[in-house]
Image (cartoon, coloured by chain):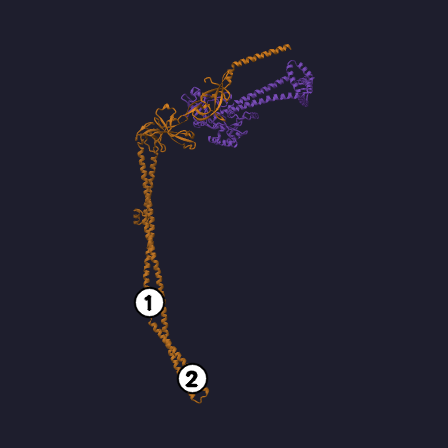
Chain colours: A purple, B orange
Amino acid sequence: MKKIILGISGGISFLFFLILLFIGGHLAKAQSSQQMAERWSDKKDVAQVSCFFSVNSKITQDQILEFEHSIDKALQDASVVQEAENPSARLWVDAYSADGKVTLSTDRGSVEADAIGIGGDFFLFHPQELLSGGYFSGNDLMQDYCVIDQDTAWQLFGSSDVAGMMVYIGEVPHIVTGVIQRPQGRLEEAAGLDGTLVYVSYQTLEELGTSNGINHYEIVMPSPITGFAYNYVKEQLGRSEKEVEVVENTSRYSLVSRLKLIPEFGTRSMNGKAIIYPYWENIARGYEDILAVITFFEALFLAYALILGLVFFGIWWKHKGWTLRDAWLRVKDKAERRMELSRARHKAKKGDTQELEFLELTAKPSRKKSGSGKRPFSRIGKSAKTGKSGRSGKPGKKEKAGKAEGGSGALDAADILDLEDLENAED
Amino acid sequence: MNENGNKKREWVKTAAIIFLSIMLVLTFFSNTIMNYSLPEVATQYVQPGTVTAKIRGGGTVESGDPYEVKVTETRKVSSVAVRVGDEVQKGDILFYLEDAESEELKAAQERLEEAQEALEDARENYQLALLTEALKESDIRDVSGGVSVSAYRRKITDLWNTIFAAEDEIEPLQKKEAELEAAINAYKTQESYESSLDTGASLRLPAAEKAKENALEALRAMETALDAATTHYNAIVDSVSAGDADKKAAEDALKKAKENHTNAVNAYNTAVTNYNNAVQEKNNRDASPIHANLNNGIAAFELELATVKKDLEAATAKKTEAQNELESLGVTIGTAKNFDDMLDAIAKAQKAVDKAQEEVDELTAKSIGATITADIAGTVTAINVTAGNNTSAAMPVAVLQPEGKGYTMSFSVTNEQAKRLSVGDRAELVNSWWYDDVEVVLESIKPDPQEPGKKKRLTFTVTGSVTAGQTLNVSVGQKSANYDLIVPNSAIREDSNGKFILIVESRQTPLGTRYTAARVDVQVLASDDNQSAISAGLSGYEYVITTSTKPVEAGKQVRLTDNN
């Protein structure tokens, strides 16, 4: 009985492991802000790297421009060349952003909203659920665009189908290029998405809003060797360790990264840097924690199932009634027989069928014989089957069946456990 | 066993029924389920059209040639006579100022007092100097008439010339004097020598006479002796008695007497010669004119010397006089200069006083019942002070837009944006319905002085019914260009293989029409706010995916939104 319960628990544990594995994988996949590398290239040799700067680091657009100019040279040095046929193809894209506040107004009303001032191809990195319109890019000719969320759209226009409409930010007209559905949920709200949010160009935020300065930078670029992109960005934009946090997004949810998080339990919440994480990084970190827990349980369930499997295997191995040598001899014997048979067939083709007949005759009984005891692998299979179908009734019966079969020389692991139980009871 | 078999069959039956019913339900709802699981996409036609890239910007309308009304003193404004937008004529009153002493007037009065004191001091100094300095009247007159430096210089030069001339005169005279004195001395020496020679000759003559007389006497004695000897000898020779010895002795004596006689004759002859010589010499000396000559020469030299000495004295006196005059002139110049300086100081102080007085007068005139008037005709575009506040010299109190001059507006754009524009482009007003007759034309594109490398400053001329200070938002750009393939901006996607769009391909199946997304690589030729012109292998009129509810991958099935 115990054996069954243990067996079932092992199975369930393994099932849980599989379920958790699936959930973990799904959760990781769902983080679109972290999956830029996958979206960017089918090949595995690109990496997405994010930098988060502290408030004091005072990084400027010029510094980013300088860094961008250095990338091509670095890639050239690493022998990365453009292979795409489309002449407009780029090897890398990047984006930077700053957070702050802006006040938008229309004839209908005005809203003070949290704002993210973007530069570069921000929305390639952070695709949003669009209700209408599209995105804009920091590389566009004009920078007087904005993407607003549905709450803002409602307050300003009373509709969410407002792409192309005009809002005033600090007296300067801006065009709404799109309306997004702001992500909602427990984590999302805690991460900073609890109020109205608009995306404007970095220029607009700097000139017409209140800006905290550029505090996020992200890039997706070829990483011909592991860690190339991460190390390059860290070296070039690293500044002092205290002022920046560099994250390789591509591998942050990999199994290795997740396992590394488990020993950081407790210390991970501590932060000595004056860095304000943007909402997507907060969410990503939240999911990191969740995934760490999931991974921890995955490991537990897997370990339980594995240990149980190993114990069962060990017991079975101990009582298997044959040795590896037997198996080897048997395989050898079979191979010889095959060879003889083929030789005889060869001869039979030439007319001498006597030997073949003899061999075929002798082969049949020997197979039967092996079925009764000398074919260990098939035997195990059978015994397992009988164990399940036959022993669903009473324990006594099973015991007898085990004993009866035990007479033929092979005992099941479960049988042995049962026998031990019996002996204990007798004691 | 039989019971067991029945049970088993029951179980199989139940399972089969459940399975089949699930399958049935799934079949019924397959479309719904499929729809739920597939990403829903919104699409638009790829179609020909126009792309117009516009540059937008806004700025404040400013007067093209503003006239700033300024007041140079700090004054309190009692009232403002005009308002922004008023049209004023030249001379119209803009501000009334309070009758108050301005800071500037106070300062000017103080300056005047100081200048007056300085003038007083300068005059006192002059008077004091007049009393203390020992001055000739002519000096004072000279000084009063102004000291001419060149005159002084001329005077000094003349004096020095006199001195030099005197010195030039003195030098040869002194030389001559020395020469004459030397000559006189030489003559005098000669004279004394000649005199000594005369004395010698006079002394030698009596001596020679005496010697001649002595020689004559000796000769006579010798003649006598000879006669005696001859007599004696003759006597002896005649005397036979006289032996040889006596004869010999007589002979010797005779011989000696003869010798002595000859000697005496010779001596006498010599003495006569000497005497004759001495007489000759004496006669020669007595007859010689040398003394007269010498004395005449000396007399002549001494006469000349006297003249030279006189000349020398005169020249030296001239020199000394010039030197003295020079010395006294130095003193005069010093004094004159002192006085001149003092007079200058007085004149300067007087000038300062005059200037300060003028300033005070002017400010005094301004400070009572003063107004600020318009210097030109135009429109008031700004008033920077209000009644009760002070004006300041640094800030214009009002700004006028001169009549007939236009307005300008400017803002900065990036170099990239500026490339698309050219001077002369006509800009549209963003809220054009608010303005009916406003025209905005791009006048210049220049580097932005604040960020010269990165930005350009666009300046527009604005005409029409606008006023300075008004904010205008305009959009300016090239004319629209036609393209064959236009897609919305949101349809353009990008990955490492470049930009692409996803088009929807339909396929008929027994279960209905299936739509799949297909990738088409594109190149973006131009973009504006809403759409982009692309070049791609498209025939036109394909459906292009603009948005989707979930990420769409090429080759995967999608669902069209209901409104398509």
Q: Are marks 1 and 2 in contact (CB under 8 Å)?
A: no
Instruction: For residue A427, say whether it is visible.
Output: no
Q: Is disc 2 surrounded by few (<14), some (14 to 19) or many (20+) residues within 10 Å?
A: many
Q: How many marks?
A: 2
Tag 1: amino acid = Asn
Query: What residue is disc 1 on?
Result: B295
Q: Quadrant of the C terminus of chain B?
A: top left
Q: Quadrant of residue A146?
A: top left
Provide the secondary structure element on which disc 2 rests. helix
Provide the secondary structure element on which disc 1 rests. helix
Residue B39 % position (x, y): 50, 19
Residue A84 % position (x, y): 50, 27
Q: Residue at x 63, y 21 (%)?
A: A309
Q: Nearer the viewer, residue B559 or A246?
A: B559
Residue A205 % position (x, y): 44, 27
Q: Nearer the viewer, residue A342 or B82?
A: A342
Query: What residue is disc 2 on?
Result: B254
The relative height of residue B334 versus residue A38 in the rendered view (above or below) is: below
Q: First in sequence: mark 1 or mark 2?
A: 2
Q: Residue at x 31, y 38 (%)?
A: B357
Q: Which of the two marks, 1 or 2, is nearer to us in this view? A: 2
Instruction: For residue A163, say whether it is visible.
Output: yes
Query: Are the residues flagged by discs 1 and 2 from a single subunit?
Result: yes
Chain letter for mark 1: B
Residue found at the far bottom of this picture: B240
Q: CA distance from mark 1 to mark 2?
A: 61 Å
Residue B94 % position (x, y): 32, 29
Q: Quadrant of residue A369?
A: top right
Q: Quadrant of residue A354?
A: top right
Tag 2: amino acid = Leu
Q: Nearer the viewer, residue A45 or B45?
A: B45
